[in-house]
Amino acid sequence: MKRKLLLTILGGLTLAGSVWAADPPTLESVVGDYATLKVGLDTLWVLLAGVLVFFMNTGFGCVESGLCRQKNTANILAKNFIVFAIASLSFYVLGWGLMFGNGNGFLGLSGLFGVTGADNSPATGDAYEGAYKAIAWAGVPLWAKFFFQLVFAGTAATIVSGAVAERIKFLPFLMFSFILVAVFYPVTGHWIWGGGWLATKGMWDFAGSTVVHSVGGWAALAGVLVLGPRLGKFTKDGKVHPIPGHNLTSVFLGVFILWLGWFGFNPGSTMGLGDGKLVAHVFLTTNMAAAIGAITAMATAWFMLGKPDLTMIANGCLAGLVAITAPCAFVSVPASIVIGGIAGVFVVLAVIGFDKVKIDDPVGALSVHLVNGVWGTLAVGLFAKDSVQPGTAGNGLFNGGGATLLVNQFIGVVAVGAFTFVGTYIVWLVLKAVLGIRVSAEEEVEGLDIGEHGNEAYPDFVVTQPAGIHAGKGGLN
């Protein structure tokens, strides 16, 4: 048996030697094989990261539905389900071209109305030179880059869903989501990621604290202001009446899904595995910010509210993730801990603060995505360290770089915020005038599951209302 095995091995080596001698590899063939392998591995990484971000839709659905009442669960799940389908069509038809098409400093003008050149392009960076030079740096097929950017666009739209939950009509929400992903998200995205005027000025946002999260947050704030608070959220004398969510198990599961998905969101933005050290660095800064955000939010809630509230812990983790999204590739690991820690404090203060000014956000989306999207973007200007990724953002204020980077980040925050908030506020007002965007008081009391969808997530549950809430009263008696 051993002799047969030895003869087989020797025969194989002899055959391999004869093939090698007959057709030895050339330098060009070796280089070509290496390039093909690199593109293949980079493409696999980008698509895998994109799938992780896509799976975050599950997390958002779990978190939002869990933090709202049982009678609105099917409605919230339906919104989170269909919003990615809407975003897929919207981003393909127009959003992609506006964001990455060759154009001017304010919007893309080439490759609009469908993604052009993808089917016949080679799998190299040159594939993007036709209409999308802004992403020529990513040496993966155009469809891979499109899919990865698509899941980011879908995330921005999903952020709005939670903030306007429990009182918005289904159809106007879908129409708004289409417009957000077709116009507002890609225009500001072009300014930063598409080679636009903010990128030229020197603003940096590695994975989207502003491009994705604060854009979704500004759009959500506009919607919340136009909609008004839920019935019974604020008493007639101005006091806050808590409306607890119905399923904290769902919240727990959703946050861990989002935490997992963020390992695609941030590290995937490297668009390749060529710099393994950077990919690993982003993994760690992302994780540490999330971890410390949960801890500081717990401590802050414990101090201010007297109890370590689970919903605050969960949103603290998400706040840390949002805050580190812009600076994850530009700051050291210790700096990521500081950034995430501050985010955990901010999210608790913001939740309490929005309640005080009577802005009703059922899931804390504004506190997580808007407040900490802004904070994370500014943190680049404070904590960036050139040695982490040389030749990019440079050094921030705390590392001897002066205030230039911080000022550029601030300009970006203000410009994106002003454009998105004003523009989407107008869209919400138009939808309100044309279609109406809020369900009737009777439907809100009964629940949107029945009124909007004709089915219930929990058909065997007994639905109860907090004392004093009645249709048409607009608050507590």
Image (cartoon, rainbow, N blue to C red):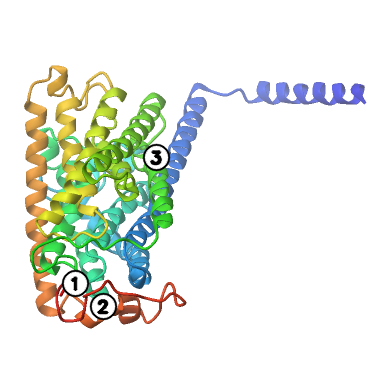
User: Which residue is tagged 3?
Assistant: 263
How busy is the neighbourhood of tag 3: few (under 14 within 10 Å), some, or many (20 plus)? many
Instruction: Say above or below: 261 vs 177.
Output: above
- The residue at 32%/33% (across/down) is 292
Whichever of labels 2 and 1 marks the residue nearer the N terminus, that label is: 1
User: Which residue is tagged 2?
Assistant: 445
Could you tell me the amino acid type at mark 1?
Answer: Leu
* Element carrying mark 3: helix
* Element carrying mark 2: helix
In which quadrant of the rendered view does residue 272 lie?
top left
* Element carrying mark 1: loop
Mark 2–mark 1 distance (CA, rounded to whole Å) = 8 Å
Towards the viewer: 192 or 365: 365
Instruction: Say above or below: 72 vs 213.
Output: below
Give the percent coordinates (x, y) of residue 208: 24, 43
How busy is the neighbourhood of tag 2: few (under 14 within 10 Å), some, or many (20 plus)? many
Whether residue 117 is visible, yes or no, is no
Do residues under tags 3 and 2 come within 8 Å of each other at their CB atoms?
A: no
Could you tell me the amino acid type at mark 2?
Answer: Val
Do residues under tags 2 and 1 come within 8 Å of each other at their CB atoms?
A: yes
Whichever of labels 3 and 2 marks the residue nearer the N terminus, that label is: 3
Could you tell me the amino acid type at mark 3?
Answer: Phe
